[in-house]
Image: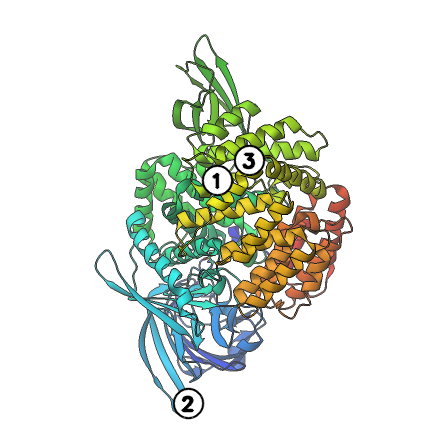
């Protein structure tokens, strides 16, 4: 297969000024006619080449004159008109079969309704079109369907609707904003609607509509409220106002992405839209708030200003993640949010950056763009914007944003153009900063300190280096903003936070007037996406753990202490005294009245096994699991009374609130339950059983279910059975039932997970259900996935091959856990590699899986 390269970018030689689409919807035979007004903008001899896949061409005409066979060519991927006039109307009619579309790209059916997903290249399976983000066109759409599809929706504003013969009806839509084809959307079906309105900052009224499965409208209330908060926030934080008179969101059950920002008609995976206390956890609420905001924010960062080509994907995704993280921080507390964001960044992006699938935030080549909706493009892309803000300061950053919105509105642009706005607005040279977009890999930063007591001076020596990544053997230094403060040994502040910009391989900084030996608090707030090592001793870390004013670093100190203890034990040299000391310090942190419960819950969570595995050249997941469990047990025994007391105190009696404070209490209570399950004596068991049995909301329920499952035996069977019985008709909750078994730490988990793929409720064609079981197991259950027999790897490869036959995009997302093979001990790494080889050798593999599996082999 042919790779697409950034260096080969050429503008499309025609403009498509208007696009008129008529859909005659039918589950197995949908007719799509398209009328494109085309004008040549490039060279005289350029042919018109339109993308089109899996389309049955019924008719084609130019200015109303049907084309003869010799006047155009069609193959499996395109339609070519070699000699096109300079300005003309092209009409095509095609037939497609939405009901057989299990790839969930283009027009397909979910739960008996029609819906679309066009990003990145799904539109070409709907009609012949230049399906690339730099071709912007004004769309008008007519939809005709049977009356059993009462709602007929598309982008923009409704202009007409009415009934037709034979029980059919129609609706017409017009979108005044030129848009690329990936933002096209259509939905048709029986839906309930929740309606509201929003008054924008200039006083315009916008009608808001959330469409959901019949009977589910009350579960859309939180998403609707989140939408209004997001609209307000974007006005306040970025001065961005909504532009159409109508904003619609539709929830569907079968969806490859989390959600999609189609102009005026966002389509959501129902898991990221529907919530009520009985069926959704606090984490679901948190994600709904963030994703509703994310998709809404795309209206400016993505839709009004879009990407010139797919290599610029981070232009909209990194920036939009940065924006949704800002909203979450304002809604839920900056420190807690930052810790969660960094935890996710490390777990997903650092792992990606350290393996064979590492790629720059702006890649330069791909086989399938679907494979680049990655943690690197999203999360590292957001970190880059965050650093830009740190380096420029908030006012200059905002000036740069304003300039970008003003200068590029209505355009498809590049990362270079984006950065140029910030350089211009701030008067700074940002040419070195661009390296963050082009260079893959996580930089390693070291800081060494030398304190001269007589002079009262501290010298910091900072160095940076980045290991080679595929295709990039030599790395250059990047500008890294490192936020640093100093504490005294008793925890007093010695020096406030200052940003040191490390922009060379090595530099030294000297600070005078430091009256006593300081404790360094570096990379505060995780000011850059790097791996930091310092010469701090454990005693320094205890100072930070106990008193750093930077809450991120307070948490980080605890994590580093715990991590070192686990790694030491896994390496066969346990530090019993250190473990006691850690448990003591943790106990003190948990009784600190000044700290919020949400923060304490984070303190109580030990570094995850996948994160620990990242620290190794040749990780042994079984040894890591045992060592981590040992520390868990030590904490449960040492702090038993305190954990039981907190578990009791955090219980909320009375009405459910989804707000951050209540969610924090539930998080801490669940963290206590999880911790206590590591010491399963009768008293703790009774408490955990009580927790599960008395749960009145899904957060408490899942917080109780996992410890039951982890216990194995009768409690596991009973809890799973009663949970399934209670929720068997609620797909989103059943997903959780599968996911909790994916995380089952018991030795028989692999066997049980394989058996669950035969369960009548396991639906591999539904991405949520598939990921709940298979992806949860492969990513979050390392001790069982890395079974010494290799059976866990074979299971994953089997699932990848099965799913690839109908949904390549989702199959490809399952490849990553095998990609880490070099980081595991050779006995395991060889078995992982063997499965990748088996996948690559499989006949009829999709480009999606082929690209990732062959890259993973390296
Ligand atoms: N729907 C995906 C997102 O919003 C892709 N644009 O990130
Ligand atoms: Zn996005």
- Res. 292 in view: yes
Q: Position of residue 634 (x, y in %)?
A: 63, 36
Q: Is residue 768 above or below residue 653?
A: below
Q: Quadrant of residue 14?
A: bottom left
Q: Is residue 727 above or below residue 796?
A: below
The residue identified by callout 2 is: 167
Dots 1, 3 in contact, CB < 8 A = no
- Which label was assigned to residue 316? none
Q: Position of residue 805 (x, y in %)?
A: 65, 67
Ligand 2 quarter of the rendering? bottom left
* Mark closer to the chain start, 1 or 2: 2
Residue nearer the viewer, 200 or 329: 329
* Mark closer to the chain start, 3 or 2: 2
Residue nearer the viewer, 331 or 764: 331
Q: Position of residue 499 (x, y in %)?
A: 41, 29
Give the structural element (helix, strand or loop) at label 2. helix
The residue identified by callout 1 is: 600
Give the structural element (helix, strand or loop) at label 3. helix
Circle 1 residues within 10 Å: few <14, some 14–19, many ≥20: many
Residue that appears at 52% across and 57% down: 694
The residue identified by callout 3 is: 559
Q: Position of residue 236 (x, y in %)?
A: 28, 49
Question: What colour scheme does the image use?
Answer: rainbow
How far apart are labels 1 and 3 at the CA level? 12 Å
Residue nearer the viewer, 352 or 289: 289
Dots 1, 2 in contact, CB < 8 A = no
Dots 3, 2 in contact, CB < 8 A = no
How far apart are labels 3 and 2 at the CA level? 64 Å
- Res. 380 in view: no
Residue that appears at 65% across and 56% down: 715
């Amino acid at each position: 297969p042919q790779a697409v390269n950034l260096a080969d970018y050429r503008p499309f030689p025609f403009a498509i000024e208007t696009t008129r689409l008529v859909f005659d919807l039918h589950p197995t035979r949908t007719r799509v006619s398209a009328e494109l007004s085309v004008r040549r903008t490039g060279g005289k001899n350029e042919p018109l080449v339109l993308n089109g896949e899996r389309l049955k061409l019924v008719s084609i005409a130019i200015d109303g004159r049907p084309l003869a066979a010799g006047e155009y060519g069609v193959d499996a991927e395109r339609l070519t008109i070699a000699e096109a006039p300079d300005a003309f109307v092209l009409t095509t009619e095609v037939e497609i079969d939405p009901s057989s579309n299990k790839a969930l790209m283009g027009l397909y059916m979910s739960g008996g309704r029609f819906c679309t997903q066009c990003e990145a290249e799904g539109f070409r399976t709907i009609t012949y079109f230049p399906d690339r983000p730099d071709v912007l066109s004004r769309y008008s759409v007519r939809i005709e369907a049977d009356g059993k599809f009462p709602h007929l929706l598309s982008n923009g504003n409704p202009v007409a609707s009415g009934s037709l013969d034979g029980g059919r009806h129609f609706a017409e839509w017009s979108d005044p904003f030129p848009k690329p084809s990936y933002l096209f959307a259509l939905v048709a079906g029986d839906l309930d609607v929740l309606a509201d309105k929003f008054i924008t900052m200039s006083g315009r009224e916008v009608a808001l509509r959330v469409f959901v499965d019949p009977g589910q409208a009350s579960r859309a209330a939180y998403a609707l409220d989140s939408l209004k908060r997001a609209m307000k926030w974007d006005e306040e934080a970025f001065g961005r106002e909504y532009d159409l008179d109508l904003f619609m969101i539709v929830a569907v059950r079968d969806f490859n992405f989390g959600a999609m920002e189609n102009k005026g008609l966002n389509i959501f995976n129902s898991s990221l839209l529907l919530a009520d206390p009985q069926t959704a956890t606090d984490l679901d609420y948190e994600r709904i708030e963030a994703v509703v905001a994310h998709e809404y924010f795309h209206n400016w960062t993505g839709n009004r200003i879009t990407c010139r080509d797919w290599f610029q994907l981070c232009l909209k995704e990194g920036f939009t993640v940065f924006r949704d993280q800002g909203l979450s921080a304002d809604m839920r507390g900056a420190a807690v949010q930052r810790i969660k964001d960094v935890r996710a960044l490390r777990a997903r992006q650092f792992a990606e950056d350290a393996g064979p699938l590492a790629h720059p935030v702006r890649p330069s080549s791909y086989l399938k763009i679907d494979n680049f909706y990655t943690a690197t493009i999203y999360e590292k892309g957001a970190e880059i914007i965050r650093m830009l803000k740190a380096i420029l300061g908030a006012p200059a950053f905002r000036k740069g944003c304003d300039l970008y919105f003003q200068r590029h509105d209505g355009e498809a642009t590049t990362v270079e153009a984006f950065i140029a706005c910030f350089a211009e607005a701030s008067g700074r040279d940002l040419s070195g900063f661009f390296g963050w977009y082009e260079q893959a890999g996580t930089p390693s930063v070291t800081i060494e300190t030398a304190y001269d007591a007589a002079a009262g001076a501290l010298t910091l020596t900072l160095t940076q280096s980045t290991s080679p990544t595929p295709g990039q053997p030599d790395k250059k230094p990047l500008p890294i903003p490192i936020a640093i403060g100093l504490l005294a040994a008793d925890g007093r502040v010695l020096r406030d936070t200052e940003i040191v910009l490390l922009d060379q391989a090595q530099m030294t900084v000297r600070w005078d007037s430091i009256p006593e030996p300081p404790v360094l608090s570096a990379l505060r707030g995780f000011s850059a996406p790097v791996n930091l090592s310092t010469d701090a001793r454990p005693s320094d870390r205890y100072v930070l753990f106990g008193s750093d004013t930077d809450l991120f670093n307070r948490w980080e100190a605890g994590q580093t202490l715990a991590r070192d203890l686990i790694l030491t034990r896994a390496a066969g040299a346990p530090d019993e005294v250190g473990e006691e000391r850690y448990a003591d310090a943790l106990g003190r942190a948990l009784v600190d009245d000044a700290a919020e419960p949400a923060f304490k819950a984070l303190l109580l969570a030990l570094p995850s096994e996948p994160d620990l595995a990242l620290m190794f050249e040749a990780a042994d997941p079984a040894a890591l699991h045992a060592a981590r469990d040992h520390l868990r047990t030590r904490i449960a025994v040492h702090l038993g009374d305190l954990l039981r007391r907190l578990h009791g105190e955090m219980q909320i009696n009375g009405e459910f609130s989804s707000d951050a404070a209540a969610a924090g209490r539930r998080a801490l209570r669940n963290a206590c339950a999880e911790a206590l399950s590591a010491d399963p004596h009768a008293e703790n068991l009774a408490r955990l059983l009580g927790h599960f049995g008395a749960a009145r909301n899904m957060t408490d329920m899942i917080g109780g279910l996992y410890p039951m499952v982890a216990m194995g035996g009768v409690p596991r069977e009973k809890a799973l059975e009663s949970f399934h019985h209670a929720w068997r008709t609620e797909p989103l909750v059943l997903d959780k039932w599968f996911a909790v078994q994916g995380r089952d730490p018991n030795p028989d988990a692999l066997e049980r997970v394989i058996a669950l793929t035969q369960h009548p409720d396991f639906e591999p064609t539904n991405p949520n259900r598939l990921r709940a079981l298979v992806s949860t197991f492969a990513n979050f259950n390392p001790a069982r996935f890395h079974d010494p027999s290799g059976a866990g790897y074979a299971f994953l490869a089997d699932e990848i091959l099965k799913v690839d036959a109908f949904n390549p995009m989702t199959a490809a997302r399952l490849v990553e856990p095998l990609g880490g093979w070099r980081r595991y001990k050779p006995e395991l790494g060889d078995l992982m590699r063997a499965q990748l080889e088996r996948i690559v050798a499989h006949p009829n593999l999709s480009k999606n899986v082929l690209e990732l599996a062959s890259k993973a082999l390296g």
